[in-house]
Each structure stands twice: as structure tokens, then as C-alpha cells.
Amino acid sequence: MRVIWLPQAKRQLRLTAGYILREFGQKARNEFIQEVHRANNLLADNPNTGAVETLLADRAIEYRSYVVNHLNKIIYFIKDDHIEVADFWNVRREPKKLQEQTCAHW
């Protein structure tokens, strides 16, 4: 199954990768990107791997989340023949912000 990253998710991923590069260096950034690629490939092969995201349960779309590492998770939904990544979420952030931010315009 194909995985499509929506603009909000791409933006958050870039911001996170940039932060890791500035604070921890190129090696840490590369390892982080590899973790994200592994997660992306796993979701492509097994779309239902992620848990239903309870914070977004009131939405018309069933959002799922997949934990990439102890600090980040991918928020996505399955649409027809592909997966759309709606957000890349740092789990240290206020959970209520996820409800406000993730696909608020949908």
C-alpha cells in the first residue's frame, strides 16, 4: 500500500529532523530518518499495525497512530488503496493540541 505524507506531517517531520540535527548532529538525524523510513515501510505493508488514536475518536475518519520511537508517532488514516499520514506528533506535546491541530480543517 502506498503511503502519502500530507503537508502538515511533512512540515512536522522536517522540523523534528532539523532540531535533531542542530542539537545532536548528523549521525543522530540519520538514525532518526532511518527509523521513520522503517515505520513508513511497515505501515505500507501492514496498514492496521497502528492503534486507533483515541484522542481523535470523535472524527468521521478513523485515525490510527504508530509509535516511531519513544518520542514520536505517526498519525494516519487508511483511504481506499493508500495511507495518508496526517501528522507527525511529538508525544511530549500537550495531547489536547493533537485534537486541535490534526486535520482541524477537515
Image: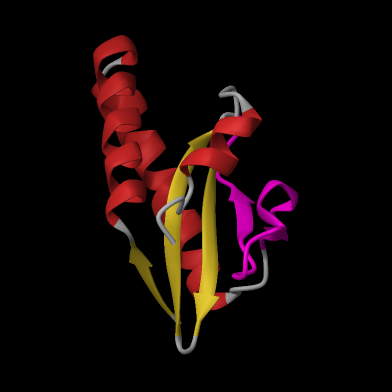
Is 86 placed above or below 82 here?
Answer: above
Is 52 placed above or below 29 here?
Answer: below
- As for residue 14 lying within the magenta part, the answer is no
The number of numbered discs placed on residues in the rendered structure image is 0
Q: Specify whether residue 81 is in view.
A: yes
Q: Quadrant of the N terminus?
A: bottom left
Q: Residue at x 60, y 74 (%)?
A: 46
Depth order, front residue of 66/34: 66
Q: Specify whether residue 72 is in view.
A: no
Q: Residue at x 36, y 25 (%)?
A: 28
**Residue 24, position in %: x, y?**
34, 14
**Residue 10, position in %: x, y?**
29, 48
Farthest residue in the top direction? 23
Q: Quadrant of the C terminus?
A: bottom left
Q: Residue at x 48, y 88 (%)?
A: 80
**Residue 16, position in %: x, y?**
35, 29
Image quarter for residue 60? bottom right
Farthest residue in the bottom direction? 81
Horizontal side of 55 relative to 68 (left or right) equals right
Horizontal side of 63 relative to 26 (left or right) equals right
Depth order, front residue of 31/73: 73
What span is in magenta?
50-70
Colouring scheme, one of rainbow, by chain, secondary structure, one colour: secondary structure
- As for residue 55 lying within the magenta part, the answer is yes
Is 35 placed above or below 61 here?
Answer: above
**Residue 98, position in %: x, y?**
56, 39
Q: Residue at x 62, y 54 (%)?
A: 65
Image quarter for residue 97? top right
